[in-house]
Amino acid sequence: MRVLSRGTTGKDVENLQYTLNILVDGHFGRGTESAVKDFQKSNNLLVDGYVGPNTQKTLGLSDFRVHIYDKDRVWFAGTPYSADYKPLRSLASWADKEKADYVYNLAFFNMSGTGNDKYGVIKGRTVTYLKAEGVDIGYGGVKDRLTIDSQNICGGYKTAIRGGAKKYLPSWGYRCRNANGLLTNGKYFQVQSVTTATETQIRDHMHKNYDVDLMLIQDSGGSTGFYDAKKEIHLAGEMEGVHGRPVASVVCVRNEEPIPDPEPDPEPTPSKTLVCLDAGHGSDTAGKRSFDGTLLEYEFNRDVVSRIADILQSEGVDVLLTAPTDSDVLLQDRVNIANQSGATVVVSVHANAYGTEWNSATGWKIFHNIGSTKGLALAKAIQKQSIPFLGLVDRGIEGSSFYMVKFTDAPAVLIEHGFYTNIQEVELLKTDNYREKCAIADAKGILDYLGVAHNIGVRDYKKMYLNLKSKVSEVKELLKND
């Protein structure tokens, strides 16, 4: 494994960040360096921020990601061999379907076949032996069998190790590799190369470092991937697209965290709901304004966030702001504020832009992290309150890898409330009435998602403003006469 340090990028950096339980973006920046130094200090290593051999060994890092589980936590899943329809699913989709904590791709499958045979549709069919949850999923491959239990048994594409002895594999062909097997103590393992490797290299790594009874080579290349459902993180050496390549079968794992004591607390403490509100950009952010300069996005964002906060607090919900002043805040700092607070949800408020001159782009849109079912549910709740209440075109809900929705621990959404590059829509964005309606819609959606009952109507902000202005005038007059 190469030495990692500040400035390096890549899949091995992602694996390091995942192991350190910090933001996973593949860039070894200041935050990663700080986490590395903290780890080195707490483990009596040289504190230099470099991830060299000693730090790698202590972290358990190498060119291969090896996960070992008790067999009772593992099961296989896939589409039945003879099914009329064989949908391919992303690892995140499989995790949601199977209610699994961790998911790995498993067997080779037919990606491009056409037509039918006596077993049904060919495309999407698993082409090595697999029985998953008692159902026949695929046939073919090697004769060796990896048995979890009577309901979950798999073959493989090639046998790498049998009875502790290495079997022949080619030493050429660098791809992201994927294999599974059993140790001599009966535990199940899944091993994947962090970047690319040969079949010989992944075999030799397991043979040298572990007591392996059986090891089978499984689907590799662009299919190879690992998904952590709790953290909503997908690690893949040859990531295809945003979601990764959809696959036909997977290995599923339950988390080994201890089961909470079922006995009720005699004096239960209600869980605290905290909504983290993120007002996008800042007064020092370049651009981010209408072409005529009459609308500054940061000002719109902060005004709406302030109104949302007022509504939520009036309903008894605690609120945290990531950008409490007009100045911009780094995205990583915003994410850190949200994550360290233990926020229940994160809502990032924005106005949209398109092009370099006035144009017809229009409408409302909301984004959530790709594969986040909770983020999608939050987005749907806010959309339901916003459309048609705001009177804008509904551009819909979209999965995204925007920083504020991807790297927050809590379910997060980013809302675009209209285009300030549209000469008609920018006038709407300037009005007190529209901003109030945006805040009401967002707040109602948040409360609906949280299950908090509410009875929110359109508040008379103008009256409140005039009352406040009157009181300010009274105070000024008293000070003048004092």
Image: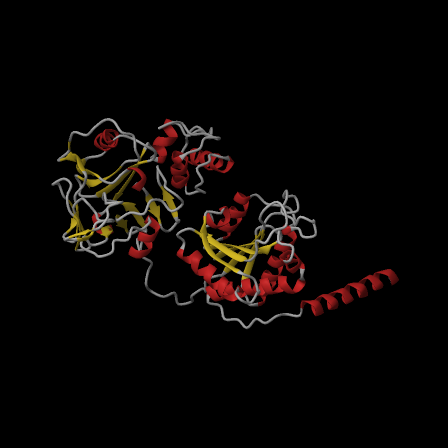
Foreground pick, 27 / 171:
171
Return the x and y of residue 466 as percentages of the image width and height.
74, 67
Return the x and y of residue 246 as percentages of the image width and height.
32, 47
Query: Residue shown at 28%/36% (left/top)?
Result: 177
Foreground pick, 405 / 261:
405
Q: Is residue 426 left or right of residue 392?
A: right
Against 218, residue 464 (above or below) is below
Q: Is residue 162 left or right of residue 108?
A: left
Against 241, residue 308 (above or below) is below
Q: Which quadrant holds residue 437?
A: bottom right
Against 286, residue 6 (above or below) is above
The quadrant of the picture occupied by the C terminus is bottom right
Q: Farthest residue to the front: give it.
A: 115
Q: Which quadrant holds residue 65?
A: top left
Return the x and y of residue 350 as percentages of the image width and height.
57, 53
Query: Residue shown at 51%/64% (left/top)?
Result: 445
- Is residue 143 among what the camera can see? yes
